[in-house]
Amino acid sequence: MHRVLARLTFLLFVPAAVAAPTPPPIVARAWLVADMTSGQVLAAEKPAERIEPASLTKLMTAYLVFSALRDKKLSLEQQVLVSEKAWRAPGSRMFIKVGTQVGVDDLIRGMEVQSGNDASIALAEAVAGSEEVFAQMMNREAARLGMKDTSFRNATGLPDPQHYTTANDLYLLSSALIRDFPQYYAQYYSQKEFRYNNITQPNRNRLLWIDPSVDGIKTGHTDTAGYCLIASSRRGERRLISVLLGSSSESTRAQESLKLLNWGFQFFDDVKLYAANQEAKSLEVWKGAAKSVKAGFASDLVLTVPKGEAEKVKAELLSQQPLVAPVAQGQRVGTLRVSLDGKPVGEYPLVALEPVPVAGFFGRTWDTLRLWLK
């Protein structure tokens, strides 16, 4: 018996406006701006070029710390003994003292608000026992998230020839952190300053003061990496993420990032094709206790298009036929292939929204005969 893909083509119509212009000129070595809701990159320059991430590395450090908190392997109230290695960390610091106990919550704020290398190492040691083992965890997590052009050698972003990433991979990491840990993202990344050991340091993300829609996420700088900034802005139901790498100054990275965010919000719209768990199609099921199954999408299916271009969206549904029971809820039963003005945009898995167990003996026998005749 062969499986075939049954096709259903339909159009989505939305009133027209003006097509999106080219993005503004950006002063940076590499950059991109993406819509997190749809997962689409709206524009990019050298997004796959390997670069030194500097303190943007701390996003992966935070991701693993948040994972440890979620899995109850760490707690915010837990006290961490500061090692000599953490205390001696060069570069930006939160000024923790060797041999003292510091709470995990303070260390996270020191790492994310003050960009403390000492705090990053202390957290890495708390999670993995050593920074070296923690770096191995970072690389495993990067591979799991699909960061194909990333290699981590430390928890801080201090320069190393084998410590690199790309704008594409940093977008994947940033969106994963916001998506997987929204509580911790809201708790730490919009904080404008943090005081520890009688020293107050401001968040280096200037956009937190310039644009109230910006709520994170991280800056980075070394002499070789230049000035870097990943920023996230939420306006209404939309969230955009900009990744800017290798800019010329702290003020320039903020200005150029804001250009990208404003451009993305002004000239693009999100179009929701389907809500999560909304029936998109009823598919015939063979040898099942039910004759059909409702199929749809596990999460909201949103497409980002230039303003006025939504009527050019074309969606083609390819369903697996014959679909034979048992069918599990969440099982992939087809694909939605979406294009804009004839150009492919993406493919999205169509899943069963309900289970369909196998039919009894007579039902299975009858459908076996029908399939044979068909």
Image: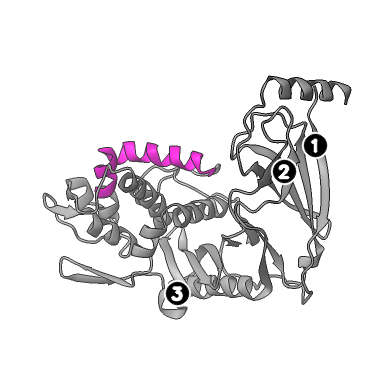
Q: Amino acid at mark 1?
A: Leu
Q: Position of residue 253 (x, y in %)?
A: 49, 70
Disc 2: CA contacts within 10 A as few (<14), some (14-19) or many (>=20): many
The magenta stretch is 122-147
Query: Viewed as shown, does residue 321 lie left or right of 117?
Result: right
Q: Is residue 24 above or below residue 33?
A: below
What main secondary structure does the magenta stretch of the protein show? helix
* Residue 300 appears in the picture as rendered: yes
Q: Position of residue 125 (x, y in %)?
A: 25, 43
- Work out whether mark 2 precedes mark 1 in sequence or the reverse, and give the earlier one: 1
Q: Determine which of the numbered discs, if any, sits on residue 5 in the image.
A: 1
* Residue 31 appears in the picture as rendered: no
As rendered, which of 229 and 74 lies closer to the eye? 74
Secondary structure beneath disc 3?
helix
Residue at (25, 38) in percent of width and height: 129
State the quadrant of the C terminus: top right
Residue at (65, 27) in percent of width and height: 358
Q: Amino acid at mark 3?
A: Leu
Q: Is residue 81 above or below residue 231?
A: above
Residue behind mark 2: 335
**Residue found at the far front of this picture:** 362
Residue behind mark 3: 207
Secondary structure beneath disc 1?
strand
As rendered, which of 275 and 169 lies closer to the eye? 275
Q: CA distance from mark 2 to mark 1?
A: 9 Å
Query: Viewed as shown, does residue 258 lie left or right of 13?
Result: left
Callout 2–callout 1 Cβ contact below 8 Å: yes
Q: Amino acid at mark 2?
A: Thr
- Work out whether mark 3 precedes mark 1 in sequence or the reverse, and give the earlier one: 1
Nearer to us of marks 2 and 3 is 2
